[in-house]
Image (cartoon, helix red, strand yellow):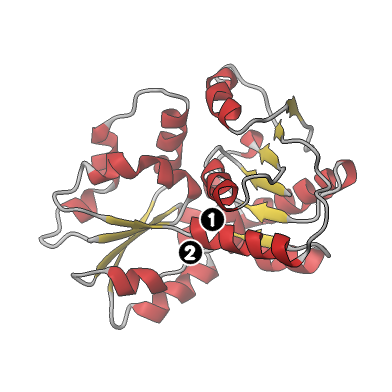
Amino acid sequence: MLIFDSGIGGISILENIKKNIPNINYIYLLDNEGFPYGEKKESFIIERSIKIINIIKKIYPIKLVVIACNTASTISLTILKKAFNIPIIGVLPLLDKATKVTKNNNIGFIATKATVKSLYIKKIIAKYTHHQNIQIIATNQLAKIAEKKIKKLSISSLELKKIFHSWIILSEQPDTIYLGCTHFSFLKNEIQNIFYQPIIFLDSHENVSKIVQKHFLKNKKKQNIKKNIFLYSKYNKEFHKLFWILKKYQFSCIKEINLN
């Protein structure tokens, strides 16, 4: 199984998959050379995703791909499913649960600018806006803040308040927030702290995990990947700050891969 993202946000997807399938082996590809996907053009994201899968398929016997990024999923999933003959699972926001759990009918949806602009999200939002009050924030900054937290760097509550300002000043704030980026799950506590009422946080992680589990139960084959592998597309001076989280996921092999 290949899991890829432009940042470390996809680790939150891996966390959920491991809860349901603890003995699964995986390749995590951190395309940090392309980080953040949320600031890239759609054509770049599609071409990059195709290139990643093609390169990994040539080296490793993967039978399943998880696009652990909302932006890449909303933009390229349909195209990738047509381009490859292996199952490809994306992280797609679903607002059904949000409409059921909200008490005040105020739902917040936050994602990268590219995700919010995608046709998929426009259709999802249009489906519910006639009977739900959906507040939208499009931001690329929050993923960068999440990366700072993962690297154990200090993050500013003032930065968060600036991003969420349009919701904070509302007389009735959203009581349910859908996190439309895998990075954002790492910031639930920090986001909660800037609101005056308890927030219900929702994301696509559990749904993705269930789809992956269903695939492995349906296809009862031996795993082709024999160890957990972590690949990255560019080394930089801050890379060592990720080592603590890599140890947690038992990567026995960590190495750079050329995607160009």
Residue 198 higher or lower than 148, as above or below: below
Q: Which residue is mark 2?
A: 93
- Mark 1 to mark 2 CA distance (whole Å): 7 Å
Query: Please, what secondary structure does the residue beneath circle 1 have?
Result: helix
Dot placed on the residue nearer the N-terminal end, 1 or 2: 1
Q: Which mark is residue 195?
A: none
Q: Which residue is mark 1?
A: 70
Q: In the current view of this chain or complex, which residue is farthest to the right? A: 58
Name the residue located 40 percent from the left edge and 22 percent from the top edge. 153
* Residue 62 percent coordinates (x, y): 81, 50
Label 2: how many Cα within 10 Å (few below 14, some 14–19, many 20+): many
Query: Please, what secondary structure does the residue beneath circle 2 have?
Result: loop
Q: In the current view of this chain or complex, which residue is farthest to the left? A: 171
Residue 203 appears left or right of 176: right
Name the residue located 43 percent from the left edge and 37 percent from the top edge. 146
- Residue type, mark 1 in image: Asn
Name the residue located 32 percent from the left edge and 73 percent from the top edge. 99
* Residue 14 percent coordinates (x, y): 58, 45
Residue 215 appears left or right of 72: right
Residue 55 appears left or right of 256: right
* Location of residue 177 (image quadrant): bottom left
Q: Nearer the viewer, residue 224 or 233?
A: 224
Label 1: how many Cα within 10 Å (few below 14, some 14–19, many 20+): many
* Location of residue 227 (image quadrant): top right
Residue 76 visible to an observer of this rendering: no
Q: Nearer the viewer, residue 227 or 196?
A: 227
- Residue type, mark 2 in image: Pro
Residue 94 visible to an observer of this rendering: yes
